[in-house]
Image: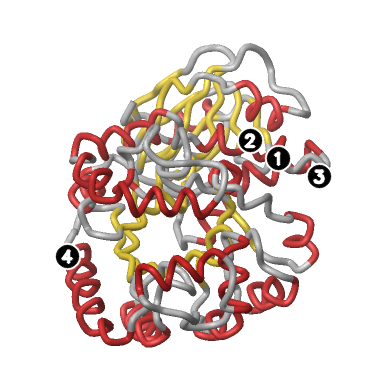
């Protein structure tokens, strides 16, 4: 049993002052220190400096560790030039990003407050790094392949990687399943992967409607994707439509990443299906895909959270930076409500979407906590100030263990 005494606690939906937290692996109680010192006389006590604040650890639902070697290799500005540069440099990026490279990305996330992340794994090369990471990890084994003749071989490779991740037994590591996208995965593969997810009770994730090129290809078998698929896969038509793709996920609430180009009917389908959108603002900007319509998500009652994507389309794996960029990207949305919703999107709402017992400072939740050093007493606009000013993180706790 341990007791920690900050000046302030951001839960994150309310601000508490002058309260202590009793915890072990989980948060046991929040209340006056005087009561806890009598109730738990043998507890270890940590009193934090003046103007210290505790808040939940951040949850990054979508990151690609295997492409962490990129810095200036890939071409930004538009989706197709970026994708072509990925194809051109794919082997170099993967081969040059060894264990140390991926560990550096994990450490970047930790130092900026991420205590849980969802790793989208295309090849399984990041399994050892994810297994050894100090954070909680949802490890999404990705299935990809649009050619039916290759379905059995691709599924076999996917299943081998999935079983390897399922053999990891450390606390805080959870295997899961990712479907790459509607344009890159044949419906036969999607059905098999989702059936397996249901049988094993695994979380699912997918990319959906990221770019204008994807929109044109799925709707009309046209646009810049047409030349890409004809050149690389000898394929002249898409393997599915957006509507058909979403129908495959009926009964499988899924994390749908990007969704920038989705129409209102598709947003309505996402809402009815209980799916959650992962908004990656920096990635969307760098690849020229536009800004997601948060007001449309709200009016259709679509759940959404924020993530960083990987370093193939970002310059940092820093959720505080991601949220600050989102503040300015969505310039028509009222500022303070947006700041609060963004913070919730990487704490309490992300925990709900990923079926995790964390994301809030409250009894029974996992003791995943950040200690921040403020300059003065937080006011009514503190959530906004938090995103703007980036207060120093002086300590990080994951499942009750101090990791920084």
> Which tag, 4 or 3, sits closer to the chain's start?
4
Between the C-alphas of marks 2 and 1, the distance is 6 Å
Report, in whole angstroms, how far the alpha carbon at label 4 lies from the one at label 3. 44 Å
Give the residue number, with chain letter if any, for mark 2.
325
Q: Are marks 4 and 3 in contact (CB under 8 Å)?
A: no
Q: Which residue is mark 3?
A: 333
Q: Classify mark 4: helix, strand or loop.
A: helix
Are the residues at dot 3 and dot 1 in contact (C-beta closer than 8 Å)? no
Sequence-first tag of 3 and 2: 2
Image quadrant assignment for residue 19: top right
At 24% from the left edge and 44% from the top edge, which residue is drawn?
A: 92
The dot on residue 164 is 4
- The answer to which image quadrant residue 167 occupies is bottom left
For mark 4, does the 10 Å Cα neighbourhood hold few (<14), some (14 to 19), or many (20 or more) residues?
some
Q: Is residue 42 left or right of residue 31?
A: left
Nearer the observer, disc 4 or disc 1?
Answer: 1
Q: Which mark is residue 329?
A: 1
- In the foreground, 242 or 87: 87
- Tell me: 16 left or right of 367: right
Give the residue at x 79% y 39%: 331
Helix, strand or loop status at disc 2: helix
Q: How is the image coloured?
A: secondary structure
Tag 2 and tag 1, C-beta contact below 8 Å: yes
């Amino acid at each position: 049993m341990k007791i920690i005494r900050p000046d302030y606690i951001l839960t994150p939906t309310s601000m508490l002052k002058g309260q202590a937290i009793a915890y072990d692996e989980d948060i046991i109680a929040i209340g006056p220190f005087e009561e806890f010192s009598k109730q738990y006389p043998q507890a270890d006590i940590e009193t934090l400096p003046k103007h210290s604040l505790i808040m939940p650890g951040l949850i990054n639902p979508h990151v690609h560790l295997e492409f962490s070697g990129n810095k200036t290799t890939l071409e930004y500005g538009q989706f197709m030039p970026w994708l072509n540069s990925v194809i051109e440099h794919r082997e170099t990026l993967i081969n040059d990003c060894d264990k140390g490279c991926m560990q550096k990305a994990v450490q970047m996330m930790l130092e900026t407050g991420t205590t849980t992340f969802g790793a989208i794994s295309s090849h399984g090369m990041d399994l050892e790094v994810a297994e050894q990471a100090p954070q909680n990890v949802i490890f999404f084994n990705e299935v990809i392949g649009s050619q039916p003749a290759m379905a059995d071989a691709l599924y076999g490779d996917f299943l081998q990687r999935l079983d390897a991740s399922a053999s990891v037994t450390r606390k805080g590591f959870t295997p899961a399943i990712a479907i790459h996208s509607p344009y890159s995965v044949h419906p036969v593969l999607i059905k098999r992967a989702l059936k397996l997810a249901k049988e094993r009770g695994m979380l699912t994730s997918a990319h959906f409607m990221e770019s204008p090129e994807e929109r044109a290809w799925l709707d009309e078998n046209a646009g810049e994707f047409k030349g890409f698929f004809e050149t690389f896969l000898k394929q002249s038509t898409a393997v599915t439509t957006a509507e058909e793709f979403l129908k495959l996920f009926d009964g499988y609430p899924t994390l749908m990443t990007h969704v920038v180009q989705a129409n209102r009917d598709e947003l309505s389908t996402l809402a009815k299906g209980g799916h959650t959108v992962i908004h990656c603002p920096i990635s969307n900007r760098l690849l020229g895909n536009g800004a997601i319509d948060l007001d449309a998500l709200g009016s259709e009652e679509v759940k959404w959270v924020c993530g960083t994507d990987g370093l193939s389309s970002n310059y940092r794996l820093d959720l505080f930076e991601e949220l600050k960029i989102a503040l300015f990207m969505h310039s028509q949305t009222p500022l303070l409500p947006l700041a609060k919703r963004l913070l919730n999107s990487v704490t309490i709402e992300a925990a709900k979407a990923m079926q995790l017992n964390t994301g809030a400072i409250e009894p029974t939740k996992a003791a995943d906590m950040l200690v921040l050093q403020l300059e003065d007493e937080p006011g009514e606009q503190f959530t906004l100030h938090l995103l703007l000013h980036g207060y120093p993180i002086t300590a990080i706790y994951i499942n009750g263990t101090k990791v920084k």
